[in-house]
Image: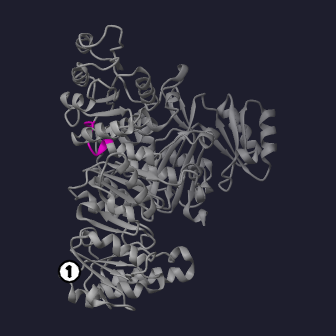
Amino acid sequence: MSTDLTPMFAPEGVVVIGASRQSGKLGAAMARSLATFPGARALVNARRPEPDEGVYASVAEAVTHTRGRLDLAVLCVPAAGCAQALAEAAAAGCRAALVCAGGFGEAGPEGEQYAQALRRIAQETGIRLLGPNTSGFFAPHLGLTASFVPAAGQIPAGDIAVVAASGGVNHALSFDLVAAGNGISLGVGIGAGLDVTAPDVLAHLAGDDRTTAVALHLETVPDGPRLVEAVRRAAAVKPVVALVVGRSDVGDFARSHTGALATSWRTTRAALRQAGAVVVDDEREMVDALTALSRVQVRPLDDPGLAIVTAQAGPGLLLADRAGVDGIRMPELADDTQQTLSGLLPPLTYQRNPVDTGRPAETFARVLDATAADPAVDLLAVYALTEPDSVDLASAAQDAGLGARSPAVVVVGGLPEDVAEQRARLHKAGIPALTGPASAANAVRALVTHARQRAVPADAPVRERTAAVPSGPLDEDAAKTFLAALGIRTPDRVACDTRADAHDALRLLGGSVAVKVLDAAILHKTETGGVHLGVRTPDELDAAVDAIGPDHRYLVEAMAPAGVDLVLGVRRDPVFGPVVLAGLGGTAAEALADVAIRLAPLSAAEAARMPDDLAARALLDGWRGGPVLDRAEFGRVVSALAAALAASPDTAEIEINPLRLTADGLIALDAVIVHTADRT
């Protein structure tokens, strides 16, 4: 099957199968939408052919009478007739097809049979198939509107592409982008994705010179590794902004400790970030991010510096506040910069960053230029109103060289008609213009995120060799013995078969110990009363053993020093394959879901960056005199655990919870290893 989607998205000719003259019919709506396409066009209606009117009885007849090749067939027939229509189109030479109808896999067993028939014909003939169950796509620069949504034909051409799981979201996002002053290069609704899926379209867009940024909307991911690779390739040449649906869906992930935290939504977002996408929380943030990233980009930097110039103090404060929340650095401007600004601005204005200009005057362009030129500033955010007899904001921004030379976002406030005029001029100059502080803050965050992602060096392929996990059930002692072989520190301990053995272990270890049930079948020892901490005396030991019961073995283990508890796990995700999760340990991990996720295998250097994702990362950096995490040690532990899972195809999950950060480093206090056979 060809990987070239040019016949789909840039066809020489289009044929509508199931065309109709009846208003309200899908075939009629699609015929109207395609009427402006400048290439070859034909309509097919086997029941009511009118050759003199360009309506033919078959695709073969349409090809004979139409000048130019009919690359794309648009099927506007019910689900039951789609397979036959697709076969007819392929036999007549069509190389791509759009199927809009519903009633396939989502409609039950009969619909699934229709879907299988479509898939089989596509595979046998090589014709590429978009849909079914989609409202279509559009390529405005070609005058191609293969959509039954009438307003889609009015979408202006531009340089932002939309790849959406839903045809409705494709249109909604495109209209929102247009309302924000953008144009669309290609808008695609994937629908059921029987053949063409998001990775296929991303691969097409990676080589599309018209597209400077891509919006990616996802609902489900049928092939995680393929999606990640497609995003990685596209993001290497242009920004990809991703929105993932399913924040509240935990699904089957609640089957294990790690899985309960790493929901499909979180794992998908983490995978996309790791592949280089800028991940956003909602469609408003997506529009703001694309408005900025399609025009300017901040050079690759670990920690870009933001400066704010505002003609009104209050909105500037809103911008500065959001920057702080988003962890974006706002450096104080250099003395030379402040001296320059003091000669341009009234003496009572704040000039260190943010720069409050007061009501903008004729010096506004020079203020922008001086601030953007400060050596600590990598991105500038500007706010001003369109006041009468005040500075012309678009002219000032252009005079200051904002845009590609000095990356900036500009917020224009005022009446809608005034804002639209200023925004159009700014966009023409390549300067992203937003309509409020919140939108500007979204754009700033996207630009900074994109810069940080590109600053991360491409790690060398992970080639670490490690021992495979032993076969058979592994209790906590056996699991920790394996961890120790990987170089992961564990407490001193003794596995005991009897009460007498436990007393010998207490004397051997000395001090305070933990007494635990030792049984590979018990994964949640605390919930079954199988863990007793701070045991010091023989009487306390007897009480712990009695509580656990006589039918079990016991693990007597030296108590670890106080510290910060983490959870660390590696597991096989059903969509993305091996993944790593790290976060706060204990019940806090589940309650707060403060976790970092990466695809495995991964290098120690990449693993060492995972704690930066945690909201509670301050706890790992010596909070109130506490221990400080050695990131290199953490990276080695994570990488070793990920390599062990990769070397053990029969292992489903390895989890350390808690992994305690102490003054002496990391130590694994509990460990669980689950084999794939144990999950079935």
User: Residue sitting at 76 percent across and 42 percent down?
Assistant: 500
Q: Is residue 372 placed above or below 641 in the rendered structure? A: above
- From this viewpoint, is residue 625 visible? yes
- Tell me, yes or no, whether the highlighted magenta stretch contains residue 31: no
- 274 vs 114, nearest the viewer: 114
User: Residue sitting at 27 percent across and 63 percent down?
Assistant: 204
Left or right position of 643 against 146: right
> Residue 553 at what x, y percent from top left?
71, 50
Q: Main secondary structure of the magenta part?
A: loop
- 425 vs 324, nearest the viewer: 425
User: Residue sitting at 37 percent across and 59 percent down?
Assistant: 163
- From this viewpoint, is residue 296 visible? no
Color encoding of the figure: one colour
Q: Can you say which quadrant of the picture contains the N terminus?
A: bottom left
Left or right position of 593 against 141: right
Q: Is residue 322 placed above or below 453 in the rendered structure? A: above
- Tell me, yes or no, whether the highlighted magenta stretch contains residue 295: yes
> Residue 149 at what x, y percent from top left?
41, 65
Q: Can you say which quadrant of the picture contains the C terminus?
A: bottom right
At mark 1, the secondary structure is loop
| Residue type marked 1 | Arg
> Residue 172 at what x, y percent from top left?
43, 56
User: Number of callouts in the render?
Assistant: 1
User: Can you identify the residue that label 1 sits on?
Assistant: 69
Highlighted range, magenta = 292-300
Residue pushed farthest front? 388
Left or right position of 311 against 40: right
User: Residue sitting at 46 percent across and 36 percent down?
Assistant: 611
> Residue 489 at what x, y percent from top left?
51, 38
